[in-house]
Amino acid sequence: MKKSVLKATAQSGSNLLKAMEVFAAVAETGQMTAAARMLGMTQSAASQQIASLEKSYGVTLFDRSVRPARLTQAGALLLRHAARILNEFGDLETEMRNQGPTPISVLRLGILASIATTLTPGLVALAKKGFGVRDVTLHAGQSGDHESLLRTKKADLAITSNPFYDMDGLERHPILQEAFLLVLPEKYRGPTDSLNAVLARLPLIRFADSTSVGRQITQHLRRLRLKPQQVIQADRSSMVTACVCNGMGFTLLTPSLLIDGFVERMPMRVVALPAARLTRTLTVVSREQELGRFPSRVAELSRAKLVEQVGAQMGDVGLAALTLLDGTG
């Protein structure tokens, strides 16, 4: 077969795999926008992929007259084959990447952005020196980003705040549980024994509802029947803490979300959260039995580094908010 034909065939296969990946995501979410967000692409690009599939096969894959979009008979048939092809290709890619001189030759790792600076040097050293990994790719983001990377098999392991119990074929190694703290401007001198009293004096600055932390805080306030009159939302801890340090309001954050702010000497006052305790758990999540002992070692190293940094930056109030966890979930 001529080289040009081989190249064209490979390109065609690559395009088809991408289109099937988009199709499977739309079928799962029922929405083009949600599927595009999951895959880190624009809605128009996702629509073009679906249109190319429909044109190639001469069929309609979705009934767009209903919301969410529903698979047609042809769409249901394609989904059965697409799911099998994508899973087999993902398994093949993993096995081929690991056919190097060591059990793990290439590693793709997702880390929560708030702890990436704290953990990255140690994790890279562990991978390279402890497990002989040749190439390491790091992705800093939020738990929603990690879900997309794991679902599409673009990450081998994630250090995240969501254990993804709705996804099969994963192993989970708990790192620690951390309680949310009340974070106030340094010059605040009002009461701290009542959230309601703080809300009466300062606007709430928090993570947006598009993030897992933001949704947790919203649900917590709803349980306490508290309704902030003024709210500022952001999707990065650095933005939230910057607003607090400038006296614009207060927030609720965990120790790991505050590390970078304290390293940068941001003027903040941190106290235990009054009333009901609110927590989240940091977990190492990886695909089952693909990385040997590496995920458990990542959990051990992450636990030690986080405790060390929280103690150094926040002292007793930070350490008291941590509960160390051990084992596999």
Image (cartoon, helix red, strand yellow):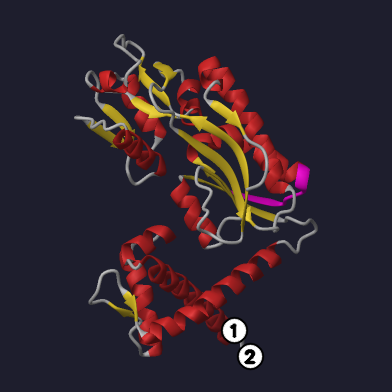
Whether 293 is drawn above or below 227: the answer is: below
**Residue 1 numbered tag:** 2
Task: Where is residue 231? Give x, y as percent.
Answer: 24, 32
Helix, strand or loop for disc 1: helix
How many numbered marks have been drawn onto this rendered protein structure?
A: 2
Q: Residue placed farthest to the left in the image?
A: 229
Whether 255 is drawn above or below 294: the answer is: above
Q: Is residue 322 left or right of residue 291?
A: left
> Which numbered disc, 2 or 1, marks the residue that appears first in the sequence?
2
The residue at 27%/33% (across/down) is: 225
The answer to whether the residue labelled 2 contacts the one labelled 1, judged by CB atoms less than 8 Å apart, is yes
Query: Mark 1 sits on what residue?
Result: 6
Q: Residue placed farthest to the right in the image?
A: 101
Residue 134 magenta: yes
The residue at 38%/44% (across/down) is: 211
Task: Where is residue 199? Give x, y as percent.
Answer: 25, 23
Residue 63 magenta: no
Helix, strand or loop for disc 2: loop
Q: Nearer the viewer, residue 37 or 255?
A: 255
Residue type highlighted by circle 1: Leu
Question: Which segment is the magenta one?
Answer: 130-137
Q: Residues within 10 Å of mark 1 (few under 14, many from 20)?
A: few
- Does residue 284 appear anywhere in the picture? yes
Write down the quadrant of residue 219 in the picture.
top left
Task: Where is residue 169? Give x, y as percent.
Answer: 61, 61
Label 2 to label 1: alpha-carbon separation: 7 Å
**Residue 297 numbered tag:** none
- Does residue 235 appear anywhere in the picture? no
The residue at 22%/20% (across/down) is: 200
